[in-house]
Amino acid sequence: MMQRETTGTFGQKAANIQNLVDLVNSSDISSIKSSLSAIVRVINDPRSTVKELKEVILLDPPLAAKVLKTANSAYYSRSFTRVFTDIEQAIIWMGSEIIKELALGQKVCEVFDRDEKIETYSRRSLWKHSIAVAMMAKMIYRKEFGMKGENAYVAGLLHDIGIIAEDQFLPKDFKTILRLSADQNVDMCSAELQILGYDHTEVGEAILASWGLPGELTTTIGSHHNPLESRPEYSIIAAALYTSDLICQERGFSFGAVPESDKQAFRQCLDIIDVKPYALDLIFKEMTAEIAKMEDRGLI
């Protein structure tokens, strides 16, 4: 398991991470904060209603437009004669679970908005990777535990937000990190530690903590490359996220970085979530098919 060794003092590292968080929170990225926090709040409240979800969506006109457009697409409407003009009708027709995931995806997608390629990395491929990880983590929860896996889905979408922060606000260092990773064939976290003294998991955790997201999400994202160091109460979601991330990186949903390859940690995570390799293969196959359908219909 990779150890986090820093090149400076702990205080200096914390200050550098906080500076990066401040840059994020004074940028366009922070515009998604209120909508994202509201959606996560609705997701985590079992007493939430269709009306509450509708109110959250209506506060964000671009999101409301996306919901109506998707509800009226052939993929969901299943009829060319029915036209939805009301958000509440769309929620009832599509189902609140689909709407929640659509809303989350739309807001998080705004963070990845401009597609840029640097070396073998691109934001577009990172976004597709994030969707794949989110869907796979959710499917593990649903198929193996009979649970909705909503926070696993959120964690998958947001787990690499620290990479976006480095990409946008530390462009020179970020290019150096990518080159170092490629030249030395080391994973991104190891390259980040050499160049910055911290990695994107720590940045992501700090950003989401500053947005007031639940500890289950912030802690899990902060340990998504060190899942065995996660807090015991978050061990299952941490293991599901790590497993999904590693499988997606290795099987075609990479974003151009050298993937981490800690087989011992991977096996231990499989033990924690009690998923057999053949079951994982079936989940990955189903996730891949679902993403292909969404791409065919222009939904991602």
Image (tube, rainbow, N blue to C red):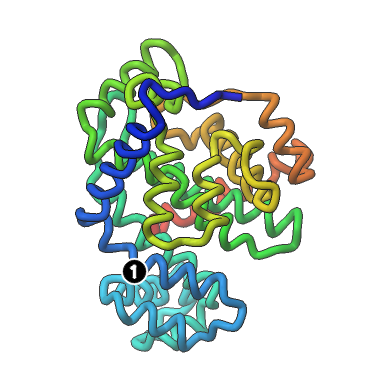
Q: Nearer the viewer, residue 299 or 28?
A: 28
Which residue is at 55% across, 82% downward? 48
Above or below, comparing residue 201 to residue 105 in the picture: above
The quadrant the C terminus occupies is bottom left
Residue 45 seen in this snapshot: yes
Position of 120 compared to 74: left or right? Answer: left
The quadrant the N terminus occupies is top right
Residue 285 seen in this snapshot: no
Coordinates of residue 174 in the picture (x, y in percent): 28, 28
Position of 157 compared to 61: left or right? Answer: right
Give the residue pinned by disc 1: 34
Q: Nearer the viewer, residue 114 or 177?
A: 177
Above or below, comparing residue 241 to residue 63 in the picture: above
Which residue is at 39% across, 41% downward? 203
Coordinates of residue 154 in the picture (x, y in percent): 50, 57
Q: Nearer the viewer, residue 190 or 111?
A: 190
Q: Count the labels in the image.
A: 1
Quadrant assignment, res 117? top left
Which residue is at 48% across, 37% downward? 253
**Residue density around tag 1, few if under 14, some if 14–19, many if 20 or more, within 10 Å:** some
Q: Nearer the viewer, residue 214 or 251?
A: 214
Residue farthest to the top, as pictured: 184
Above or below, comparing residue 158 to residue 174 in the picture: below
Position of 105 compared to 122: left or right? Answer: right
Label 1: element kind:
helix
Quadrant assignment, res 15? top left
Disc 1 marks which amino acid?
A: Ser
Coordinates of residue 137 in the picture (x, y in percent): 60, 50
Coordinates of residue 113 in the picture (x, y in percent): 26, 51
